[in-house]
Image (cartoon, coloured by chain):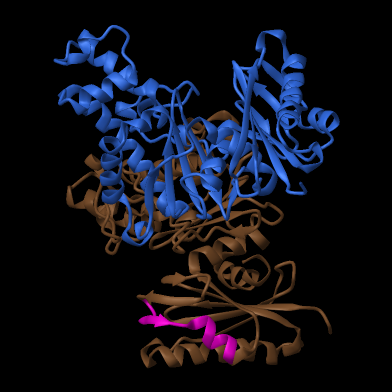
Chain colours: A blue, B brown
């Protein structure tokens, strides 16, 4: 029973997911409890500590075997100090999360943002297992990102690296304003939100599309319509794939990763989407920067967060 | 006399520059000799080794004090093995440069490409001294780049990271083909070559510009004309600054460096250029990713190469 284990915590607005990983990133146990965001910051912090202890107690492992606890959380952080400057969906402001957990759990604590942590999970023990240099995208409500170089997360000077969704990539004439306040971010076209917006715009413009019959359009509806041959829907998905592929081409000459890992709800479109991304990537990437480079789907699904959070202890 | 010194070699098509640095990157001595490219690869290799020995012999230092020899060279390399796959301007193909120099000099040898090495020089002991995260641009015939994270060069999976000039950033409708074969690379608009091309195009189109009177247009002519109020020239410089600034905005959310360091001939345009770059950067960069971020001119000039090459030993 002397094997070291690592606890990963993925703090969401509704639930907190906790996982135990071994040193290779294999997920041994998971646990999930309510975040209780409405009860305020102290309750959220207590729940994080409580669930971290609980999962170990309920397992066959000893607390002594815990090599550390990593936490992934959405928001603006100061990663080195583990300070949460602002988390919109948890309503947390200026909170010393790392300090609190160190005191409470008496373990090594590492904090990072949810997108970086999901990227580390995939790079460490998912689609990128064994690959030291990966760039990861999560196509969900927004476009999340994380950059792994030599097995470690690139944090940036002010903990703002890896914000791939906010690459300003759409030319001004076609650009709309992003939630971040800037023009033409990748997120405005390649996220589920972006795809839904383009679909609603098309319906409002009275474009001939089967989507006009759909009540509450979701990204999946647009992708399904595109696959079924709806030209308007196909154009929307192509646009999402185009800017995503162009951003990959840029990352290829900037960071030259071996793997691009793409996850999140929109990525479930599968080869229909990936083939288009690969085509654009191929067109815009210098030969030497794309040789041996793979564009692959994420494999951990919703577990990427807990696995990556655990990984912070060994690879953070 | 036990102080360690580091020898940096900057291999150009015409001359090989050599320098001795101390452990802080201060340049103590320089030496320059002919590359003798026309005599073929063996002569070039011998000259590199010869000049590295010579500069130390001519100095007050002992060969025993040499902590290693770093070499910067233009071309496609395999950085970890120090193998030169192809160098167009030296006419070198498939050559084990690192192995040769290890044998010849009996020292630690590190090889990297000229743009990465110049970036390391500036980050280590130039404009970025003391700043761990820097993204560097060299605006010359092409647009060179180098990325320094935690004080070290980002090499990439196939030694192709930092090729900032080949970010495909100009939209297709306005893009021209780059020397690399791809469309819309930053280099096509923000290098001296790009600026000259745009100026010649304007003159050929009979745009009203003072550049029509210039015999052999250089980038400096275009910049000077723009500063003097020539509207056509000003538009060309603005275009170079626009795409450069946009690429910086992208790098800010991808890598979140503290310093952007811009050097090379075109950067001598000074504030006239830098102010425009800063304006574009400010417009397209998310607030949190630009807070405390500086865009500064390079300070080492032509010595960045030898300093950075020496720096490979400690920071490579």
User: Which of these two is toward me, B135 or A115?
Assistant: A115
Instruction: Tell how many labels.
Output: 0
Q: Which residue is found at the position 33% from the left and 41% from the top? A: A245
Q: Which residues are magenta?
A: B89-103
Location of residue A211 (image quadrant) = top left
Residue A256 % position (x, y): 44, 55
Whether residue B207 is visible to the viewer of this picture, yes or no, is: yes
Q: Is residue B38 magenta?
A: no
Q: Residue at x 62, y 89 (%)?
A: B105
Q: Is residue B299 visible?
A: no
Tell me where residue B59 appears, x and y as whole percent. Answer: 72, 88
In the displayed structure, does residue B30 sit left or right of residue A284? right
Q: Is residue A232 left or right of residue A45?
A: left
Task: Name the residue at 49% across, 64% down.
Answer: B115
Q: Is residue A135 above or below residue A99?
A: below
On screen, residue A140 above or below A62:
above
Q: Residue B280 in the image: x percent, y percent?
A: 46, 36
Identify the image quadrant of residue B298. bottom right
Q: Nearer the viewer, residue A189 or A278?
A: A278
Residue B163 at x, y percent in the picture: 43, 57
Q: Residue at x 30, y 40 (%)?
A: A274
Q: Quadrant of the C terminus of chain A?
A: top right
Viewer-nearest residue: B196 or A41: A41
Of residues A211 and A36, the one nearer the viewer is A36
């Amino acid at each position: 029973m002397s094997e070291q284990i690592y606890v990963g915590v993925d703090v969401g607005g509704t639930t907190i997911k906790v996982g135990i990983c071994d040193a290779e990133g294999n997920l041994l146990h998971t646990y999930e409890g309510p975040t209780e965001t409405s009860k305020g910051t102290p309750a959220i912090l207590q729940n994080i500590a409580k669930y971290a202890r609980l999962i170990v107690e309920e397992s066959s492992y000893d607390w002594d075997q815990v090599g550390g606890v990593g936490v992934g959380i959405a928001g603006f952080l100061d990663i080195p100090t583990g300070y949460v400057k602002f988390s919109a969906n948890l309503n947390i402001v200026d909170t010393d999360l790392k300090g609190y957990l160190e005191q409470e759990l008496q373990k090594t604590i590492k904090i990072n943002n949810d997108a970086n942590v999901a990227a580390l999970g995939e790079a460490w023990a998912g689609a990128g297992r064994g690959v030291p240099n990966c760039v990861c995208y999560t196509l969900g409500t927004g476009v999340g990102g994380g950059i792994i170089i030599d097995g470690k997360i690139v944090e940036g000077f002010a903990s703002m690296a890896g914000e791939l969704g906010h690459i300003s990539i759409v030319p001004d004439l076609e650009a709309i304003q992003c939630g971040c306040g800037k023009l033409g971010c990748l997120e405005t076209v390649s996220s589920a939100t972006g795809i839904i917006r383009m679909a609603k715009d098309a319906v409002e413009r009275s474009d001939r599309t089967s989507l006009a019959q759909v009540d509450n359009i979701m990204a999946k509806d647009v992708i399904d319509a595109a696959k079924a041959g709806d030209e308007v829907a196909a154009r929307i998905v192509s646009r999402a794939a185009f800017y995503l592929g162009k951003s990959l081409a840029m990352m290829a000459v900037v960071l030259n990763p071996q793997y691009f890992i793409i996850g999140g709800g929109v990525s479930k479109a599968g080869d229909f989407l990936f083939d288009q991304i690969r085509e654009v990537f191929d067109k815009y990437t210098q030969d030497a920067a794309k040789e041996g480079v793979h564009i692959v789907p994420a494999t951990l699904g919703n577990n990427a967060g807990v696995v990556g959070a655990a990984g912070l202890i060994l690879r953070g």
